[in-house]
Image (spheres, rainbow, N blue to C red):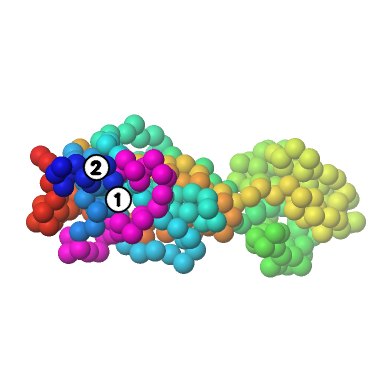
Amino acid sequence: MTRRMVLMLVVAALVAASCGNLGLGQPDCISRGQDVSTATVMTVQAVPSARYTPCLNEVRLEWDAINWSAETGRAGFDLLRRDRVFLSAEVRPACDPSGVEVDSGFDDIRRFEDVQFQQTNIGITIIPSGERPQIRARLLVEDLAGVEIDDRPVVFTIDDNMDQTVGNRVNLALLRDQYVWIIDELDAEEGTVELRSDVVGVAGSGLDPDDALDVIEDFVPEVFYRGTWYFTFEGGCITYAFDARGALAETVADDADDALGFFPAYELIQAARDAGYDIGE
């Protein structure tokens, strides 16, 4: 049995058992072939046509585990937090990218992003109906400076474009922010607001601002970052698949940019051959 055949059997066992690295070592972006791991060899064996393979620049403290796997036609690793995968990096011979193309930072790599996310900040646009409500809106923003909902900062914006109707301004505001407070003359006199949103159940008139915040807190959506980044290049495609929630969602995009990378496959192939592995043609 050749060394190549033994390695491919190891791959099959690893995938079938859904295990982590099992001491095989992780593909990293730093070693540059100085310490060729079994994981490295199997990665380039899995997708020999790909110019690049996914790798790690560093491991972050909030990552509990890194599970690596490979089989013919695909290879990569999952990042886990509390036994849940929140980011997967994988190389394949090809993919069908979707979303918006953005700058990859590489001349020979195209990058596409198809993601949905719920931002950390909670946005509330205040729409006064006239001069007196406008004064009340400004005082209210000062009083509520620094307020948070579910440990998330609330950002207030006052829309005082009196040339537009209140209805038009509400519709435009809901395209920017999750919630709208309307202040008319009666609200200005009584210190109340009318709450509007696109969320079922989040509405009300004649509300004390603190009560309006309580209504929002009962329905505020969880922070998340979901979707896929695609990196296409000669002979292959690397995808980052995201499903991050809560605090992880706030940083996962920056972490992916900083901590994950691309290793030139030809360096791995040559280093593996120098170490005596049969990578094939």
Q: CA distance from mark 1 to mark 2?
A: 19 Å
The answer to if 34 sits in the magenta stretch is: yes
Q: Amino acid at mark 2?
A: Met
In the displayed structure, 151 sits above or below 163; it is below
Residue depicted at 51% across the width and 56% down the height = 81
- The 10 Å Cα crowd at callout 2, few under 14, some 14 to 19, many 20 or more, is some
Give the labeled residue for mark 2.
8
Query: Can residue 197 be seen here?
Result: yes
Marks 1, 2: nearer the viewer: 2
Give the labeled residue for mark 1.
54
Q: In the visual, does 62 lie left or right of 161? A: left
In the displayed structure, 55 sits above or below 110; it is below
Q: Position of residue 128 (x, y in %)?
A: 75, 51
Q: Position of residue 34 (x, y in %)?
A: 17, 64
Q: Earlier in the sequence, mark 1 or mark 2?
A: 2
Residue closer to the observer: 63 or 149: 63
Q: Position of residue 189 (x, y in %)?
A: 89, 56
The part of the chain drawn in magenta is: 11-35
Residue depicted at 42% across the width and 45% down the height = 18
- The secondary structure type at the circle numbered 2 is helix
Residue closer to the observer: 45 or 90: 45
Residue depicted at 79% across the width and 50% down the height = 215
Rendered-image quadrant of the C terminus: top left
Q: Position of residue 36 (x, y in %)?
A: 20, 59
Residue closer to the observer: 85 or 161: 85
| Residue at the farthest front position | 1
Q: Amino acid at mark 1?
A: Pro
- The secondary structure type at the circle numbered 1 is strand
